[in-house]
Image (cartoon, rainbow, N blue to C red):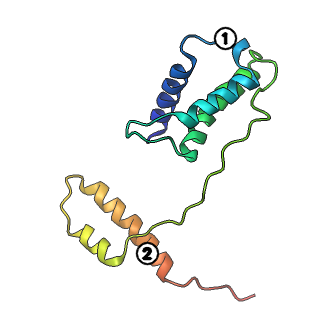
Amino acid sequence: MPVYNYWISSYNLFKKFSGSSVSCIDITENYCKKYLEYLKTTITNRGKCLDNSSINHYFSKFSSVVKDAVRDKLISANPLDKIKYLKVKSSEPIYLTFSELQSLVNTDCKHLELKRAFIFSCLSIYFAIKTPTPHKQL
């Protein structure tokens, strides 16, 4: 999702949570915790709860706005200082096999430049994995 869309989505989620206009006086630690809890229960368009990574991403947009308000002296202290982000499981990257890549090369695509860039990216990773890196002699 492009960065701009994350900001719009974050704004829309916060607007649904707050219901109406919010004053800087309302942005307390407790209010921020409630917003984080709200994000944990938010259902996506696909009918699933947001994963922790997405929650953290949306909450970081909110956090950025709060930090700007503190910097601009609209809020005296940062109410987010004691609130921790959710833990996110690290995942192993999944790579295309060489035969999958060959199949991709043979597939028609109306966006040829995009296809070429993607294939170049895949090949760069493929050869980086398959080619041992020479070590410098000390």
How far across and down, in percent of the image, does residue 91 sit?
A: 55, 62
Left or right: residue 128 versus residue 118 is right
Give the residue displayed 57% in from the left and 18% down from the top: 18
Q: Quadrant of residue 127?
A: bottom left
Going by the numbered disc 2, the residue's amino acid type is Tyr
Left or right: residue 19 versus residue 97 is right
* Quadrant (top left/top right/bottom left/bottom right) for the N terminus: top left
Q: Secondary structure at mark 1?
A: loop
Give the residue displayed 54% in from the left and 85% down from the top: 132
How far across and down, in percent of the image, does residue 24 sit?
A: 70, 14
Q: Nearer the viewer, residue 64 or 49?
A: 49
Q: Residues within 10 Å of mark 1 (few under 14, many from 20)?
A: few
Residue highlighted by disc 1: 23
Left or right: residue 81 versus residue 124 is right
Distance Cα–Cα, label 1 vs label 2? 52 Å
Q: Nearer the viewer, residue 84 or 49?
A: 49
The label on residue 126 is 2
Q: Secondary structure at mark 2?
A: helix
How far across and down, in percent of the image, does residue 124 sit?
A: 44, 71
Q: Nearer the viewer, residue 133 or 46?
A: 46
Left or right: residue 106 versus residue 70 is left
Give the residue displayed 51% in from the left and 33% down from the top: 42
Tell how many labels: 2
Give the residue displayed 39% in from the left and 72% down from the top: 123
Relative vertical location of residue 130 with respect to residue 48 in this rendering, above or below: below
Q: Quadrant of residue 5?
A: top left
Quick one: label 1 or label 2, which is nearer the N terminus? Answer: 1
Q: Quadrant of residue 78?
A: top right
Relative vertical location of residue 85 with respect to residue 73 in this rendering, above or below: below
* Quadrant (top left/top right/bottom left/bottom right) for the C terminus: bottom right
Going by the numbered disc 1, the residue's amino acid type is Ser
